[in-house]
Image: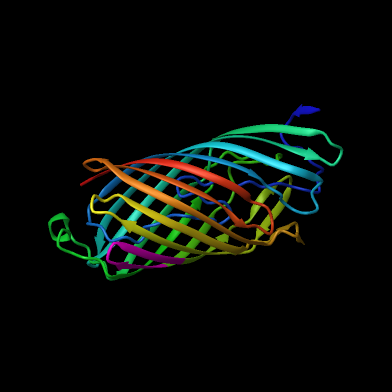
Amino acid sequence: MLEKTFFVLPKKHHIVWVLFLFTISIFGQDLEPRVYANVAKDLNVVAVGYVFMDGNVLTEPSLPIADFTVQSHNLAVNYIRTFGLSNKLARVQVSLPYSFIDGQLTGTNGNVLAGSRNGFADMKVRFGINLLGSPALDKSEFRNFEQKTILGVSLVTSIPTGKYYGDKRFNIGTNRWGFKPEIGVSKRFAHVYAEAYGGIWFYIDNNDLLGKKLEQKPTFSLQGHASYYFKNNMWIGFNTTFFFGGKTITDGVSEDSQMDNWRVGGTFSTPIAKGQSVKFQYHIGAYTNNGLNYYALSVVYQYSFF
């Protein structure tokens, strides 16, 4: 039996879905290589991306759900601007996604409940600066510069611009702010670039979840990337991320929602014309202890100019 609804479960339970696009992240999951890469200052990058996501998401073990499957088609516009700050390379990045989501779940009574959501997801803004190993060079100076080791820091802010219904359990937006301070290291070995990032997501409370207050503990995230560059600027990369924490508390009641998850994936990028490239990425859950077991496939067109 298939019922058209919006995943209405008993009121003592809830499902909160968070979708951030382009740098795909769900509850702190990020897989974005070359965040702290050395480039010339005054560079502008405009990119348009498409992401397909499909997965069986088991949320709280107490939920009366046998299966929860979501398919989402997502579009995102991304803009990056680099500049000099105290003679160090800095950058600001803004990403705005739009999501088309369909899903279904099976209740303990065997009924299949289906629903959909369309709308903007939460905007993300990243400000970062490379503290060591990456001076702010103009285009002509940059041609003769070779990267060695870079140490950078950044702050990612999640702005609650996404569509949100306080009386629904299934949402695109989060109705709260999030902040992630991060530190990253990038090291060049001939044609190989190795990178490692560590960060912590901190969340403001959501005071409008079915008339209740939702709190979430910090989520810790670690990323690792290894990318091989060819002479024509084509590159391939291996990506991995590990994230843990993020336990939720509803009206003071702690839930069995702590995460301890690991994801792996690959990236391929190729130039198609001067200042233009196309990037493909695929990633999947390697280990999932509590929900968020899905795969994602993305394609991004990027145009760079001064």
Left or right: residue 194 versus residue 218 is left
Which range is magenta?
A: 184-197
Vertical comparison of 282 with 38: above or below: above
Residue 191 part of the magenta-drawn span: yes
Residue at x 60%, y 37% (from the top left corner): 71
Judging depth in this view, the residue of 238 and 163 nearest the camera is 238
Vertical comparison of 155 with 53: above or below: below
Coloration mode: rainbow
Report x, y in % for residue 263.
Answer: 55, 57
Main SS, magenta residues: strand
Residue at x 45%, y 47% (from the top left corner): 281
Vertical comparison of 119 with 173: above or below: above
Residue 137 part of the magenta-drawn span: no
Report which quarter residue 88 is drawn in.
bottom left
Left or right: residue 21 versus residue 64 is left
- Residue 137 in sight from this viewpoint: yes
Residue at x 35%, y 54% (from the top left corner): 92
Report x, y in % for residue 206.
Answer: 64, 52
Report x, y in % for residue 232.
Answer: 24, 49
Residue at x 45%, y 52% (from the top left corner): 266
